């Protein structure tokens, strides 16, 4: 399906703004060791824990769990790509290091992150679709219910 150019620009701007906002919030606090600076090993452990928890909640079979794991791997790859080189907090600090906000550098950062998002999104969307389509109707309803609630699996 071909999207209208204004929709593409709006989505790109929205994602770019979210990335910059996330970077700014990262400057303000850490996420208990699971945040921006977590090691690759720690992130892999966390991802495996989440996959196990979701698999239990949805009562996934082995094939479904494999698709969920593939989705989690794609999400982690997309995160690494979005993070790019260097510390995001340092990137944001550099924008406000002088007397004036560095608009050109901020726009370049947003453009870079948006390009990374666009490059990885087809594989991510395919993995998400493969996982969701592998679910039976009751499991799909559980996912929809989860998305309707505020919070996450830990609150159910």
Image (cartoon, grey):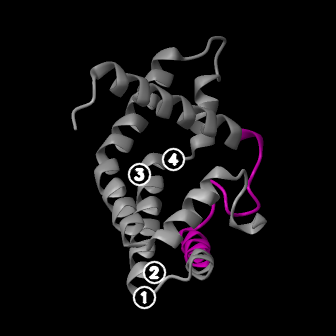
Q: Determine whether 30 is above or below 4 in the image.
A: below
Marks counted in the figure total 4
Say if mark 2 contacts mark 1, CB within 8 Å. Answer: yes
* Mark number, residue 62: 1
Mark 4 vs mark 1, CA separation in Å: 37 Å
Of the two numbered discs 3 and 4 in the rendering, the one whose residue sits closer to the viewer? 3
Of the two numbered discs 4 and 1 in the rendering, the one whose residue sits closer to the viewer? 1
| Callout 1: SS | helix
- The answer to whether residue 140 is left or right of residue 114 is right
Q: Read off the magenta span.
A: 27-51
Mark 3 vs mark 2, CA separation in Å: 24 Å
Q: Earlier in the sequence, mark 3 or mark 1?
A: 1
Q: Which of marks 3 and 4 is nearer the N terminus?
A: 3
- The answer to whether residue 104 is left or right of residue 116 is right
Of the two numbered discs 3 and 1 in the rendering, the one whose residue sits closer to the viewer? 1
Viewer-nearest residue: 91 or 127: 127
| Callout 2: SS | helix
Of the two numbered discs 3 and 2 in the rendering, the one whose residue sits closer to the viewer? 2
- The answer to whether residue 120 is left or right of residue 109 is left
Quadrant including the N terminus: top left
| Callout 4: SS | loop
Judged from this view, the residue extending furthest toward the front is 137
Mark 3 vs mark 4, CA separation in Å: 11 Å
* Mark number, residue 65: 2
* Mark number, residue 86: 4
Q: Residue at x 50, y 24 (%)?
A: 106
Q: Where is residue 59 in the image (x, y as percent from the top left)?
A: 56, 83
Q: Determine whether 11 is above or below 87 in the image.
A: above
């Amino acid at each position: 399906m071909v999207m209208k150019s204004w929709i593409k620009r709006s989505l790109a701007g929205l994602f770019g703004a979210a990335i910059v906002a996330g970077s700014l919030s990262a400057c303000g606090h850490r996420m208990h060791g699971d945040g921006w600076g977590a090691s690759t090993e720690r992130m892999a452990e966390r991802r495996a824990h989440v996959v196990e928890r979701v698999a239990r909640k949805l009562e996934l079979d082995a094939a479904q769990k494999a698709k969920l794991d593939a989705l989690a791997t794609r999400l982690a790859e997309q995160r690494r790509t979005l993070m790019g080189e260097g510390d995001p907090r340092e990137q944001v600090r550099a924008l406000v290091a002088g007397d004036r906000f560095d608009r050109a550098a901020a726009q370049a950062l947003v453009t870079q992150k948006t390009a990374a998002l666009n490059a990885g999104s087809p594989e991510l969307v395919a993995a998400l679709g493969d996982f969701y389509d592998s679910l039976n109707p009751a499991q799909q309803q559980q996912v929809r219910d989860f998305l309707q609630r505020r919070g996450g699996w830990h609150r159910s």
